[in-house]
């Protein structure tokens, strides 16, 4: 991992990153700190894989919108050599401790890195991600490896990442590749410096361009700022990097917290937070700006909330101030404040709103370079069916299948065993069984 960067040329073999040692050395102990992601994954346990349909393809097989279609946890927490195909709706199921939350956590970490977040913010407790029973190498280093495949107009693009967690948190290897060709490779050349040596495809007589990149940022996300796009090779690098960045920046981790939604919400931009604490303010904005979305949400509320529901409403003080969300019960009953609803009803309303909306109504920073119609919003929901009854879960999954079937929304979530059993085999839903 500390060896000097090897010479790089356009004929670099597809099996590894130029100048970077293989991810797992022969005879190395499982979990020892890798130098970079390897060219081929380890054997994949059958219980940790699932076949899932990819995003809706355009004519000729090209994908309309960039989307993550495979997640790889080569060495991460409880997972080793695991690959997960991701379809429009992918549900992860398994007993406690099987690693459901870790899968979504790794996905969210890649998304945050793709948005430019620093490594220490993404992994505040990196030791918790080191593979189980990991043994440090001779220099007392341990870490983890994750990666993904993003399909889109540029075709399937693979991203592999090796992170050192001990003794210092840093990215020690990154590889971006397409069609077996390495477009970007990084290696830790000098452990005393907070940088890695990067090499990206240029083409022509130059072959590859080499330059240092910071070891606490995803190099792929930095490429659009460093590559001019003057040669065919550079344009290929840019197309692949931008496709990955667009897909990762279009991810919205969502974990509705009912205890934070019961109080009136301060008026603001009306962009839904990840914990949905400002649900009432988002309902205010949605009611004013989008009658269609508001009508769909009202219909969902009728199907998922107890008692009669004539509509959704908000109470805004005349002089301004916090907004109170309400369920309109019709002419025969007074409205019910959201704070009086059960935890399941609040989570149901929040998740329904997320599935029916888009990036403009969510507290996220999607790629501004593309129109929203060219992006696919991916919702990550750990404990998707938590606090929900069967009727509410079924209604949310119905909404998910409808929304995801148009290719504009994707859902990756963890669920309990009862939910997994109920939806197994349903069209449009893929179930991944962990720990079987």
Image (cartoon, grey):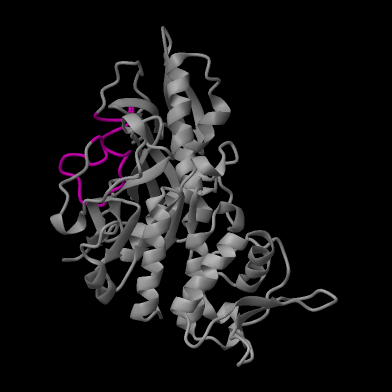
Residue 112 in picture, x, y percent from top left: 50, 50
| Residue 126 in view of the camera | no
Q: Is residue 114 rendered to the left or right of residue 330? A: left
Residue 251 in picture, x, y percent from top left: 47, 52
Q: What is the residue that sits farthest to the right in this orientation?
A: 319
Please identify the dominant SS of the magenta region: loop
Quarter residue 132 falls in: bottom left
The range drawn in magenta is 15-39
Q: What is the residue that sits farthest to the front in this orientation?
A: 331
32 inside magenta stretch:
yes
**77 vs 377: above or below:** below
| Residue 130 in view of the camera | yes
Q: Residue at x 33, y 79 (%)?
A: 390
294 inside magenta stretch:
no
Residue 371 in picture, x, y percent from top left: 57, 40
Give the position of the N terminus as an image quadrant. top left
Q: Which residue is drawn at 37% across and 37% down?
A: 63
Question: Closer to the camera, 429 or 175?
Answer: 429
Q: Is residue 263 rendered to the left or right of residue 86? A: right
Q: Is residue 360 rendered to the left or right of residue 374? A: right
């Amino acid at each position: 991992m500390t060896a000097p960067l090897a010479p790089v040329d356009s004929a670099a073999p597809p099996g590894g990153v130029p100048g970077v040692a293989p991810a797992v050395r022969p005879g190395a102990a499982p979990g020892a700190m890798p130098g970079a992601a390897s060219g081929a994954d380890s054997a994949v346990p059958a219980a940790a894989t699932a076949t899932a349909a990819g995003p809706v393809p355009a004519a000729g097989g090209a994908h309309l919108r960039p989307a993550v279609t495979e997640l790889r946890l080569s060495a991460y927490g409880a997972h080793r050599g695991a690959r997960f195909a991701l379809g429009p709706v992918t549900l992860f199921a398994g007993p406690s401790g099987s690693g459901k939350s870790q899968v979504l956590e790794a996905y969210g970490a890649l998304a945050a890195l793709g948005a430019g977040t620093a490594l220490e913010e993404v992994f505040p407790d990196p030791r918790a991600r080191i593979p189980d029973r990991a043994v440090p190498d001779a220099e007392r280093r341990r870490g983890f490896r994750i990666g993904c495949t993003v399909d889109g107009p540029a075709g399937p693009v693979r991203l592999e990442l090796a992170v050192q967690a001990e003794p210092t948190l840093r990215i020690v290897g990154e590889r971006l590749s397409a069609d077996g060709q390495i477009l970007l490779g990084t290696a830790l050349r000098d452990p005393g410096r907070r940088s890695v040596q990067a090499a990206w495809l240029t083409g022509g007589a130059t072959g590859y361009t080499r330059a240092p990149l910071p070891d606490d940022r995803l190099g792929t996300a930095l490429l659009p700022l460093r590559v001019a796009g003057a040669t065919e090779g550079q344009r290929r690098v840019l197309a692949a990097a931008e496709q990955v960045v667009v897909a990762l920046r279009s991810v919205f981790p969502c974990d509705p917290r009912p205890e934070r939604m019961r109080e009136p919400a301060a008026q603001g931009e009306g962009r839904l937070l990840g914990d949905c604490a400002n649900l009432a303010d988002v309902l205010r904005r949605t009611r004013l700006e989008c009658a269609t979305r508001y009508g769909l949400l009202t219909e969902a509320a009728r199907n998922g909330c107890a008692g009669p529901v004539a509509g959704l409403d908000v109470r805004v003080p005349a002089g301004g101030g916090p907004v109170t969300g309400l369920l309109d019960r019709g002419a025969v009953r007074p409205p019910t404040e959201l704070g009086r609803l059960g935890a399941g009803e609040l989570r149901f309303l929040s998740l329904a709103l997320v599935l029916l909306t888009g990036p403009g109504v969510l507290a996220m920073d999607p790629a501004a370079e593309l129109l929203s119609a060219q992006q696919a919003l991916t919702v990550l929901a750990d404990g998707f069916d938590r606090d929900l009854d069967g009727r509410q879960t079924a209604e949310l999954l119905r909404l998910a299948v409808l929304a995801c079937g148009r290719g504009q929304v994707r859902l990756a979530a963890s669920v309990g065993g009862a939910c997994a059993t109920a939806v197994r085999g349903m069209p449009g839903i893929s179930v991944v069984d962990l720990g079987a």
